[in-house]
Image: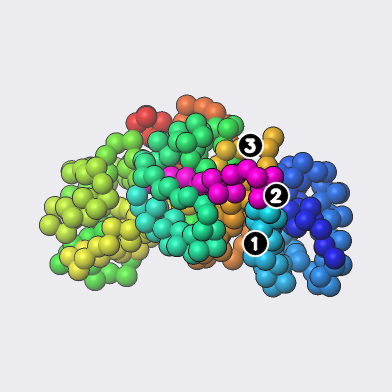
Amino acid sequence: MFQLRQLRTFVAAAETLSFTRAAERVHLTQPSVTEQIRALEDAVGRPLFARHRNALALTDAGGKLLTRARDLLAMADDTLHAVKGDAAATAASLTLVAPETLTLTVFTPVMADYAQRYPDVSLTLLTRNSADTLSTVKDGSADLGLLHGLPAHAPSLTSEVLSHDEPVLVVPSGSPLSGRQSVSVRDFAEERLGATAPGCTYRAYLEALVQPGRDMPGISFEAESVRGLIGMVAAGLGVCVLPRLAFRSALPGPGVRAVRLDGAMRNLPVCLVRPAGTHRREPLHVSAFAGMLRERIPGLDQAMPTVDVQDGPRGVAVTQQEDHGVGDVLGRADAAHK
């Protein structure tokens, strides 16, 4: 029979897909984590992890155990609090923060199922821009945050790439470009170009995208919100470039269309940020929500890298650390607007 400590270690390994990071989370050595996972596999009679291309992944048995393990650990915690007579179990809360585009497309679809699984957890959803999302998680006002792009230089945070988004060109339905399957940056060089307000990650990405070319369009109109910007495009003011998730979150009507943007950097990370907190164990109800996000976001067919970021003057970058070009420009552009 397996033990609760083995289940806690397994959940940590399943959520990080790394025995090294799991060891940090549960305050064990990596050999101890490996030993506990092997003992758990012996108990259930099936392998729980497999390696594919040097990446750790859950087996079918591991995926089934993960959901049950979270429930068992939650019940154990609730039982302990009930016996002790304290109110910790019923006072649990989860605060989430993200820009509106990501709250609508990523956070909210998960919240209803989470509330059914953890009915005693009080949920709060905050809408902030990218910079304020980082600040809210840093100061402890939120447990989890979402960003487009990797936060740069913040040792108090850990960033985990959940998925990748891609930029699209948003055009009026009547535009000649709306019938195209894809366009290049030069295809809309003569168009009036719209953007979100300075300081927004999407604005910084757009400026990095059009900056290298001499014949690229300048920004002709602005809006503080994605919905406002798309509305201006629908009204015929011009075109704009947005991440596909941002376009989808605005619930656009028939007046606009999103066209694939060729030649643009497609590796636009969607990142989950949380306090680094390696000195303490993250509450189960928080890690459970993070696990549900991983399960629900489409396109997660490989291990998600986790990076610890360090403090510095820059804001949010849009590429992995090994990427160059547009991402490097964006880091500088974003810093200039903060």
What kind of residue is marked 1? Asp
**Left or right of 239: which side holds 199?**
right
Q: Which residue is at 45% across, 33% downward?
A: 135
97 in the magenta segment: yes
Q: Is residue 165 shown to the viewer in this render?
A: no
What kind of residue is marked 3? Gly
Tag 3 and tag 2, C-beta contact below 8 Å: no
Q: Which residue is at 48% across, 50% downward?
A: 122
Residue indicated by mark 3 = 277
Marking on residue 226: none
The span shown in magenta is: 81-99
Residue indicated by mark 2 = 83
Residue indicated by mark 1 = 71
The numbered mark, 2 or 1, whose residue comes first in the sequence reads 1
151 in the magenta segment: no
The numbered mark, 1 or 3, whose residue comes first in the sequence reads 1
On the image, the x and y values in percent for residue 128 come to 37, 41
Up the image or down, 283 lies above or below 139; here it is below
Q: Which of 78 and 49 is in front in this view?
A: 78
Q: Which residue is at 30% across, 52% downward?
A: 241
Q: Is disc 1 placed on a helix, strand or loop?
A: helix
